[in-house]
């Protein structure tokens, strides 16, 4: 997991929190979501196991989730989906790390 991945997941978590704030929270959530999508795209481009086509497709899906997040009431669900899909890519690495720490 790269620094860009950690930044993207952190931005998505902040985006979820912001989505619950009425008014300006939706806009803040969208900005954080777009930042997360860009971080994910950079990470995918730098990942030798991800083709450029896959990186572009992942970016399009991320921007789609960001757009859905602009609809009040759907923001947290869309952001949760983004985090889940990102963590799924690193699931085995995360579990291996937790096993090393005797946490899984």
Image: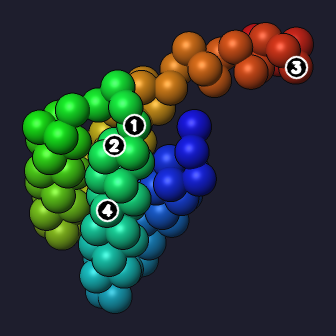
Asked whether the beta carbons under mark 4 and mark 1 sit within 8 Å of each other, the answer is no
Which mark's residue is nearer the viewer, 4 or 3? 4
Q: What whole-number distance in Å separates the C-alpha atoms at marks 4 and 2?
A: 10 Å
Residue at screen point 29% across, 31% down: 50
Of callouts 3 and 2, which one flags the residue occurring earlier in the amino acid sequence?
2
For label 3, the SS is: loop
Q: Which mark is residue 47?
A: 1
Q: Quadrant of the N terminus?
A: top right
Residue 44 in view, yes or no = yes
Q: Residue tagged by mark 4?
A: 38
Q: Quadrant of the C terminus?
A: top right
Asked whether the beta carbons under mark 1 and mark 2 sit within 8 Å of each other, the answer is yes
For label 4, the SS is: helix
For label 1, the SS is: loop
Q: Which mark is residue 44?
A: 2
Q: What whole-number distance in Å separates the C-alpha atoms at marks 3 and 1?
A: 26 Å
Q: Is residue 98 left or right of residue 84?
A: right
Give the class, few, some or many, for how many residues have Cα within 10 Å of label 3's Cα (few <14, many ≥20): few
Q: Residue tagged by mark 3?
A: 101
Of callouts 4 and 2, which one flags the residue occurring earlier in the amino acid sequence?
4
Q: What whole-number distance in Å separates the C-alpha atoms at marks 3 and 2?
A: 27 Å
């Amino acid at each position: 997991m790269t620094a860009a991945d950690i930044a993207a997941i952190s931005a998505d978590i902040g985006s979820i929190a912001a989505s619950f704030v009425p008014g300006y929270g939706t806009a803040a959530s969208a900005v954080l979501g777009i930042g997360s999508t860009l971080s994910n795209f950079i990470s995918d481009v730098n990942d030798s196991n991800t083709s450029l086509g896959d990186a572009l497709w992942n970016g399009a899906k991320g921007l789609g989730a960001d757009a859905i997040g602009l609809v009040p009431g759907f923001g947290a669900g869309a952001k949760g989906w983004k985090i889940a899909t990102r963590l799924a890519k690193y699931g085995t690495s995360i579990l291996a790390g937790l096993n090393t720490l005797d946490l899984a």
